[in-house]
Amino acid sequence: MLTLAALAAAAAEEAAHGAAAEHAAAGFDYQSLYVLLAFLIVIGVFARAGVHKMIVSGLDKRAAKIADEINEVRKMREEAQELLASYQRRQREAEEEAAGIIEQAKKDAARMTAEARAKIEDQTERRIKAAEDKISRAEAQALSEVRGQTADLAIEAARVIIRERMDGGAQGPFIDKAIAGLRDKLN
């Protein structure tokens, strides 16, 4: 194809040189006419060979390829945007979940602190009550012992006083009964 165009161009050039010599003699510019004729011949040869169809189909293929690449780039861009949105959504969800976990941990810590405080207070109250009960029992026991000793001393003192003042024969059983009743009242 290119050789045909080269031949046509060479023929046009020779014709132009030959015409230049005649032009000088005749006074007419044949050189432009020969160039025009050579150009029309080359265009005709190209048209007959279907070069214009090949050029158009090559340009169409190139345009289709570019359009496909543009569509592919658009799809890739959309996928990238969807992926970015997905990752941003996941990040927000993870941040919300982390905030929820932190909030729950704070609540659990506060609850556990309150429970521990309540247990400590409860345990302290029980220990205080146990100590108070022990003290009360010790006081009651000491008071009982003091009363018992006091009763024993009072009984003994009453015996001594009654023996000294009373006659021993007739009032003995009465005194023993009164002493026994006194012992029961004091204990």
Image: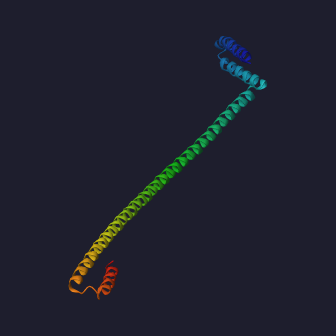
Of all residues shown, which one is farthest toward the right? Answer: 48
Task: Identify the image's colour scheme: rainbow, by chain, secondary structure or one colour.
Answer: rainbow
Q: Residue at x 33, y 81 (%)?
A: 180
Q: Quadrant of residue 150?
A: bottom left
Image coords of residue 147 (percent x, y): 29, 75
Q: Nearer the viewer, residue 95 or 11?
A: 95
Residue lying furthest front: 169
x 74%, y 21%: residue = 41
Q: Is residue 185 above or below residue 13?
A: below
Residue 37 location in percent, x, y? Answer: 72, 21
Q: Is residue 28 visible?
A: no
Residue 162 x, y percent position in the rendering: 24, 84
Q: Quadrant of residue 7?
A: top right
Question: Is 58 in front, or is 4?
Answer: 58
Instruction: Report the front residue among 164 and 18.
Output: 164
Tell me which residue sits at (35%, 66%) in the image.
Answer: 134
Above-or-below relation of 45 to 137: above
User: Where is 164 relative to 16, above or below?
Assistant: below
